[in-house]
Structure formats: structure tokens, C-alpha cells
Amino acid sequence: MAACAPRVVARRRTRATKREYEDTCCEECGSGEFGSELLLCDHCDRGFHLFCLRPILPSVPIGSWFCPSCSSSSSNSRFPLVQTKIIDFFRIRRSTQTAVGQDIASPQKKRRRPRSLALTSKKKRWLLPFTPTDDPARRLEQMASLATALTATGADFSNDLTYIHGMAPKSANRPAYEKGGMQVLSKEDADALSLCKTMMKKGECPPLMVVFDPLEGFTVEADKCIKDMTIITEYVGDVDYLKSRENDDGDSIMTLISAANSSKSLVICPNKRSNIARFINGINNHTPEGRKKQNLKCVRFDVDGEARVLLVANRDISKGERLYYDYNAYENEYPTEHFV
């Protein structure tokens, strides 16, 4: 391997440019060429081509990135849970009868699932609301992990679709535009989704933990067993026209409406406002390993005349298992051959 000149101090999480880092070489191939593809370690400042890493990285990871050598250190395998004002961060509904601390930390009685959500027929399987972790202290840790990831990526928490001036208006979100039609969320499933939203407003979050992986960046793990057909979360963010985002380099844009008239197609952009769905990774489910790892399905519904996207468990998920949704599920329009 060719010797490299002393390295300059790199900015955090950036690709090295030929002008700024002309002395930086890839530790794998020894070449300083393709500077725009050189990723710098946030710990040792050494360079690596995105295409020389194994597995190959399709783009710069979200959050800090550590090279294979530095990532072996346990101190870099997780990120600090630094968020302390959880109630204000998530705008949790404050109880008028109890103290704020008791509103979150007091033990919750086990909720009986509404009768309308029960399986009443072998031909129909209702969506299930998530079951929060019983331990209130653990729920705070789960919310703190999400707050830390959102803060690190410069995003605000939102649990709803948002419509911003200059982007697509709410009136543009019409499921009738969907090419081939869009399935309507049943009353029973709508009740389950509404219950999930209500629990989140009270600080009862899905049993999920955001963790940091040196290769995948921020990612999400199940913090308890999750049953098949459970609503994990809704995919949210700013709604915009696809035509306005065709050259966007964001790695988390989600299809909302794929219209017969392409000018009416909409996408969800979670880079500024989002929830935990922002950190759940898509999987290349066209490979045997991808199909094995996939445990969520991404489903678009007409909910009271508005297109919405839900991430739902497509099988039982074990505690500690990472979540991956079916990135290739709708048409084959994304180059996912290098995805995890």
C-alpha cells in the first residue's frame, strides 16, 4: 500500500474533496483518487472510499461514522442518551390531575385491547396497536434515544404529516390520485392507529430503541417482543411534490402517492420533522439475506381521505432484533443492490 502524507484534521462526517484533503488516501486501496467518495472516520480521521468498505456504503451515513478499527471500541458502538427534557421534546400531554413526573413514571395498568380489534375471522386480520414497555424508566430511555438521534441529525420531532408553505398543500394529498387506487383503512384498523397516536401523546411510546451502528448509522432495535401485524409507527415528515425532489440527495424520502399523472405524485421528506420511522432502515429484499432480515412492511392507506404510510410488523419480531422494511416493495425504482 502506498504511503500517505500526514493527514489534516477533517470535519465531522463529510466526504473529503480533492482540494481540501489532497493528501488523504484510502486505507484499503491506498489511492487518493475519487476524493468525493472518501469518507473520513470521526475518531481517527483516516480515509476510506465508500466503495472500498465491506459492505459497500451507498452514501454517507447519518450521524457520526467510525472506521472498522475504531468501531471495535465499545465506546463508539452506542451513542449517549443526552436528552433530558423528554416531556417538552415530545410535547407529551400533561395531566391536570397528577404531577408531570407521575404522568410519565407512574405504573400503568395493563390495557385491555378493545373488542373491535380482536381477530373475528380467519379471512381478516386486524392491525394491532403497539404495546408499550411496562417499565416507565425504560420508556424514558427509549424516548431519550430517539430524542438524541433527532437532535444529532438536526430534526424536530413530529408524529404527523406536515404541510409547509412553498411545498405541497394538504389539498394535494388525495388518495384518489393513486395509480391503480389505494386501499382504505378499515374502522377497526383506524381505531388501532388512533390508539397508537393517543398513547404517544401520553408518553407511552413503541417498544423501540434507537442505536448507532458504525456501518448503518442510526438504526432501530425492538426493545421487547413485537407481534405480527403490530403497527410500529407511521412514516411522517414534510409532504412535497415528487417533481420538486427528483434531485434531492436525501436517503429517507418515502413515496406517499404514486399518481397516474406524475405531476401529482407526492413524497414524505423526514429530514426536518420526523419520528422514529426516520431511523428504520430499508432492506434490499431481492436477496435471500434481505428477505430473511425483513420484518416490516410499508403500507399506504386512505385514512379519512388522506394518504398515510404505516410501517407494520409482517412477522413476530424478537427483542434486540433490528427493524428493516421492504424498500423494494413498490416497483423496482430504487438502486438497492448495495443496501444492507
Image (cartoon, rainbow, N blue to C red):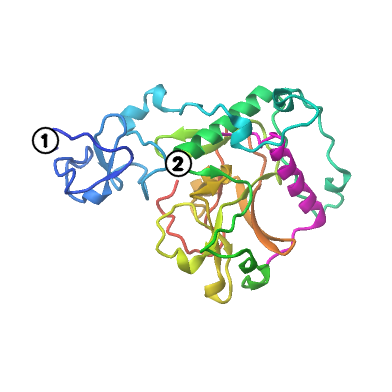
The furthest residue to the bottom: 261
**In the rendered image, the vertical position of residue 220 relative to residue 299, given as above or below:** above
Query: Label 2's element?
Result: loop
- Tag 2 and tag 1, C-beta contact below 8 Å: no
191 inside magenta stretch = yes
**In the rendered image, the vertical position of residue 26 relative to residue 333, given as above or below:** above
The stretch in magenta equals: 182-209
| Nearer-the-camera pick, 336 or 169 | 169
Confirm whether residue 31 shows in the render.
yes
Residue 293 point in image, percent of width and height: 54, 43
Q: Which residue is mark 1?
A: 5
Q: Amino acid at mark 1?
A: Ala
Residue 105 point in image, percent of width and height: 70, 23
Confirm whether residue 210 shows in the render.
no
Quadrant in the picture for residue 202: top right
Q: Residues within 10 Å of mark 1 (few under 14, many from 20)?
A: few
Q: Would you say 61 lies left or right of 220 here? A: left
Residue 166 point in image, percent of width and height: 51, 64
Mark-to-mark CA distance, 2 and 1: 32 Å
> Which label sits on residue 67?
none
Of the two numbered discs 2 and 1 on the same chain, state the one appearing first in sequence.
1
Q: Would you say 283 lies left or right of 94 here? A: left
**In the rendered image, the vertical position of residue 238 relative to residue 95, given as above or below:** below
Q: Who's the residue at 61% across and 47% down the image?
A: 296
Q: Who's the residue at 46% across and 29% down the image?
A: 79
Q: Which residue is mark 2?
A: 153
Q: Who's the residue at 57% across and 68% down the image?
A: 258
| Nearer-the-camera pick, 319 or 249 | 249
280 inside magenta stretch = no
